[in-house]
Image (cartoon, rainbow, N blue to C red):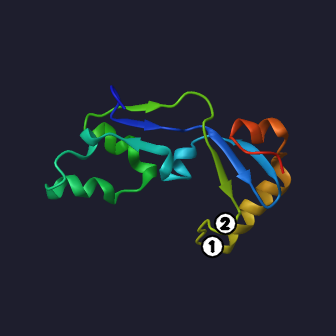
Amino acid sequence: MLPFDIAAVRNGYACYSAQGTYMPLNRLDHVCGSTIITSLRWWGDLSDSNARRYAEFGHMNVDRRAAARGFSVHDYPGRGVAYVLGHGDNTYATASRRLRVWLEGRFLARRCDDEFFTAFGHESE
């Protein structure tokens, strides 16, 4: 992490496993909080109650929270993550969100090819 306190994989791919398709996805950090990496300096002294509260905000607010604390967010270059959607373990609060994910994967995405699978360490299906 040195010299960065926060790094974010902002650009990646949405991979729709049920349809075997994918599409470029910008602002991946707004879809999945696991794409944000923080250093121990971000957390500070974990015995301090103020340090624990930094875990209590959504990943969509990391830029604003970082700026308020004087931290900068480093952007990971390129597209480093394929975020899998529609495999049954994703949590979507509404039926309309589930439908939107299905429609995107069905009509807006491209068919996964060998190159895509290889780029992320998987054999083609």
> Left or right: where does residue 92 sit relative to residue 20?
left
Instruction: Rate crowding at label 1 as few (under 14), some (14 to 19) or many (20 or more) other CA atoms within 10 Å.
Output: few
* Residue 11, percent from left and from top: 60, 37
Q: Amino acid at mark 1?
A: Thr
The mark found on residue 97 in the picture is 2
User: Is 48 drawn above or below residue 24 in the view shown?
Assistant: below
The circle drawn on residue 84 is none
Disc 2 versus disc 1: distance between alpha carbons? Answer: 5 Å
- Judge from the rendering whether residue 41 lies leftward or rightward of residue 88; answer left or right: left
Under circle 1, the secondary element is loop
Residue named by callout 1:
94
For the residues bearing labels 2 and 1, Cβ distance under 8 angstroms:
yes
Residue 110, how many percent across, how many down? 84, 44
Disc 2 secondary structure class: helix
Q: Inspect the image, locate mark 2, and give the three-letter code of the amino acid beneath it.
A: Arg
Neighbour tally class for label 2: few under 14, some 14-19, many 20 plus, Cα within 10 Å: few
Q: Position of residue 19 (x, y in %)?
A: 83, 58
